[in-house]
Image (cartoon, rainbow, N blue to C red):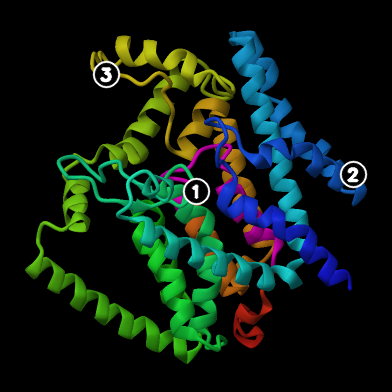
Amino acid sequence: MMKEQSYQQMIIFVVVYFFFNSFLLPEGLLFTTILTPVMVYFLFKEREIKKIYVWSLALLIPIPFHVLQGVVVNSYLISSVMVFTALIFLICVYYVVKKYTDILDSLFHKVLLINALFVFIALIALPIPGISDLFWYDVPLTKGMEVVLRLKLFTYEPSYYSLVMMPVFLYFLMRVFYNTEEHPLLIFLASVIPMFLSLSFGVIGAFLLAFLISVLVFWAKIPKTLKRFSILSTLFMVFVLGLIFILWPQNPIYFRIENIFHGQDTSAMGRLVYSFMFARDIIVQHNIFFGIGPGQIKIIAHDMIINHYKYHGTLGDVVRIPNAMAEILSIYGIYGFVFKLFLEVFFFVKKRIYNNHYALILFLFIFIYQFTGSFINNVAELGIWALVFGARFIEFDFPKSQTSE
């Protein structure tokens, strides 16, 4: 009875989080942000409110240094509140997934089913002008390429969609690999096809790299079904990629990869190179240890780009740093950058993430991805961190006799 009640209470929140968090809201506002008071009340009722006080100290330490060096107050306060709501979200989700891990399987099944339904509708709506814009992203994939529609569903871009869905897709892929699904082919397709349709190079690349590292390092501990899949899928991918290269050399995937390697892909260069260069120059000129503070990047960005970098092209109304670690470096300096990495490594060891294959891949994935994209308040990233450290799917635990060696 308690399990059913918990499921009913969480299903609406879960559906909103995965599919409608920003739907019909002004840019930058999320339903999870609006629901912050509800999360605070939940933590208070569960007697976990003290966690907010403790972790808030990390955000309070840099404030005197920011104020002394000067900030635009309105922007600083608004952005600080947004950071604080993200912290509350992280704490709340961590506690929920830790307490209700036993119903996550049912919730993930529901999310996968709903997602498959939406993808089916999106494919039907693809040729219908006006309606297709709800589901598909029509911004060019890379420089010099015509528009290739990419799946985003009700989110604002494909990379966010694939990122927020990654824990669910990975969960079911692991169940297929571990031979615990009754309908493995359907589940596999329902997990892989949406990822492919999103064409999110950052998410897919980070996932493949994380998966490859986990398989190579823990080859002796993974089941035979996964070993066979790893070998056969690698051979199949090499064959398919080679065939595509021969029959369709100017396909969107190879075209963008070529642009990335030649430094002509503005998205990849912005996320991987320019973000850290910009963040470094910001803190060097202002405060290398504690950064410039929340909400200040957009204040100084235009002037710095024009006067420091001597750029006279077209700039957007708001300049952002499209990389979570570069953004935290600019906002909170070396203090924030090192503190975040320390917490990730500390909890990786404390929670023994290396003993569970699902948690390990998810950890490696989001650890890599934070250096290639995302942003400091990204609830999709924070949700993954909460799941990595809060949940435990024991079916993916490595054998104790081997992990204890």
Per the image, label 3 sits on a secondary structure element best described as: loop
Q: Amino acid at mark 2?
A: Phe
Magenta span includes 360? no
The earlier-in-sequence mark between 1 and 3 is: 1
1 or 3: mark nearer the eye: 1
Foreground residue, 40 or 121? 121
**Would you name the residue on which mark 3 appears?**
314
Quadrant assignment, res 244: bottom left
**Would you name the residue on which mark 1 appears?**
154
Residue 334 image position (x, y, % from top left): 54, 31
The earlier-in-sequence mark between 1 and 2 is: 2
1 or 2: mark nearer the eye: 1
What residue is at 58 percent from the left and 28 percent from the top?
A: 332
Asked whether the residues under the numbered discs 1 and 3 touch, taking CB atoms below 8 Å apart as contact, a structural biologist would say no
What residue is at 69 percent from the left and 63 percent from the top?
A: 351
Residue 19 image position (x, y, % from top left): 56, 52
Where 257 falls versus 114 (above or below)? Answer: above
Residue 220 visible at all: no
Gap between marks 1 and 3, in whole Å?
29 Å
Asked whether the residues under the numbered discs 1 and 2 touch, taking CB atoms below 8 Å apart as contact, a structural biologist would say no
Per the image, label 2 sits on a secondary structure element best described as: helix
The quarter of the image holding the N terminus is bottom right
Foreground residue, 356 or 2? 2
Circle 2 crowding by C-alpha within 10 Å: few under 14, some 14–19, many from 20 = some
The quarter of the image holding the C terminus is bottom right
Gap between marks 1 and 2, in whole Å?
32 Å
Q: Which residues are magenta?
A: 368-391
Circle 1 crowding by C-alpha within 10 Å: few under 14, some 14–19, many from 20 = many
**Would you name the residue on which mark 2 appears?**
44
Q: Amino acid at mark 1?
A: Phe
What residue is at 25 percent from the left and 81 percent from the top?
A: 235
Q: Amino acid at mark 3?
A: Thr
